Image: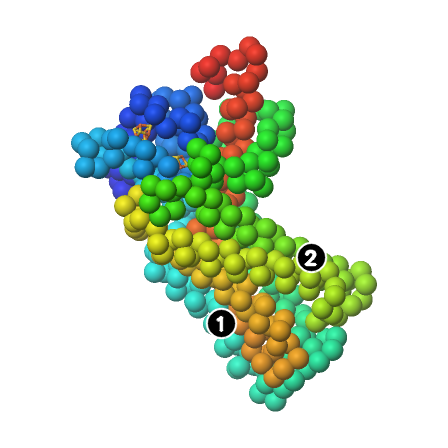
Amino acid sequence: MPTPDTMILDEARRQMTVCVVCKYCNGYCDVFRAADRRPALSDADLLFLANLCHHCRNCWYACQYRPPHAFAVALPAALARVRVLSWRRFVGLRPSPGGLAGLALAATLLVPLLAVLLVPAETLFATHRGPGAFHAVIPRDAMVWGAALAILGPVGWVAVAMVRFWRAIGADTSGPQVAAAVPLALRDIVTLRNLSGGGAGCNDRDDAASGARRRAHHLVLWGFLLTVAATLAAAGAHHLLGMRAPYPWISAPVLLGTTGGVALLAGVAALAWIKHRADPAPEAPETRTAEWTLLAVLGAAAASGLALLVLRETAAMGMLLALHLGTVLAFFVTLPFGKMMHAPFRALALLRAAIDRQETARPHARPQDP
Ligand code: SF4
Ligand code: SF4
């Protein structure tokens, strides 16, 4: 008896087989060209193709075989289901969509709750100013050890899942092939090239293509990286320069964090707007809760961080600090189980696709070389 996972893979294989024969969409994205090289469409091939898909939805609006045609090709939804399956398979665990949202909410509220229970009210709701003000509310050791526990476990889990995924999709590649393809893959990652669809952009709402989704993803990507850089700059200022948070407005941690937080918030708002208005027909509805959960966690982290910055010299600082740490905790505890897994898995899929492209470009390569 087929399992739900087998049925998802078989349905994606059926649809992709039609595409390999049809080839009409080969100009839209790397997925179709990569499928051409893998006509057998094994389970590992489908896991790779699903993570290579950037869900631009070009192929849905172009397809003459989409429902109600008897072939019922609905590739964006079929690949979205395989993507979720791949994260579950290599992470080894995936809570239900409601469970994921509940975990994010519980983690967000946990730190404020602990602050109310453990920090005396006259300290938590007092105004603290100057270096060391944050640690007057939440002791530095508690913050450092809490962060280490919250970050290292999920990040390690994601790293193991990435190794397992790469073994499935890249076992036939060599070290030199990988090394040579890394610059090409990095270029695809930082430019988000595949979010341009066939060149005109994504079909965000209907059959009119636009670059809005790609621009919003850029804001999220670079905003997120700037906030990570701000955290590293703060650690450097503390350990190397002996400075204690909160830092001055004109300092690397604050400038990086403010720019990153504003970009992240703007990107999340834009993606939420695009998603809210999107035509639901090409979607896999069961994936939507995880997508909204990630947007909510990222938006809450950015908004609470900016609010903390603006109100850090008021009596609201203690609870805002606890709330911001709660949102960061929510991001990390949901990291291996939610939509955020699309980032590392897609990066590996882009690396695998870059190896394919390099092999195809070699003068002596045969068209169907693996
Ligand atoms: S999505 Fe439709 S039109 Fe595009 S390649 Fe597949 S079958 Fe052909
Ligand atoms: S949704 Fe976009 S990226 Fe995904 S297979 Fe279709 S055209 Fe390619």
Residue, disc 1: 110
Q: Position of residue 147 (x, y in %)?
A: 60, 63
Q: Which badge, 1 or 2, is on the more N-terminal residue? A: 1
Neighbours of disc 2 within 10 Å: few (<14), some (14-19), many (20+): some
Q: Is mark 2 within 8 Å of ligand 2?
A: no
Q: Secondary structure at mark 1?
A: helix
Give the amino acid type for the residue marked by disc 1 in the picture. Leu
| Relative height, residue 329 to residue 48 (above, below) | below
**In the drawing, does residue 318 fall left or right of residue 110?**
right
Q: Which residue is outermost to the right? A: 241
Q: Give whichever of 311, 151 is nearer the camera.
A: 311
Mark number for residue 232? Answer: 2
Residue 274 visible in this rendered orientation of the protein: yes
Amino acid type indicated by mark 2: Leu
> Is there a contact, CB below 8 Å, between mark 1 and mark 2?
no
Secondary element under disc 2, as helix, strand or loop, is: helix
Vertical comparison of 338 with 45: above or below = below
Query: Which is more foreground, mark 1 or mark 2?
Result: 2
Gap in Å between the C-alphas at discs 1 and 2? 24 Å
Label 1 packing within 10 angstroms: few (<14), some (14-19), many (20+): some
> Does 227 sit above or below residue 204?
below
Quadrant into which the N terminus falls: top left
Q: Is residue 11 above or below residue 282?
A: above
> Could you say where residue 124 lies in the image, as x and y percent from the top left?
60, 83
Residue 338 visible in image: no
Q: Quadrant of residue 328?
A: bottom right
Q: Residue at x 36, y 60 (%)?
A: 99
Q: Quadrant of residue 62?
A: top left
> Residue placed at 55% from the left, 57% from the top?
264
Q: Nearer the viewer, residue 7 or 130?
A: 130
User: Residue at position x 35%, y 54% from top?
Assistant: 277
Q: In the image as oriented, which residue stretches furthest toward the bottom?
A: 122
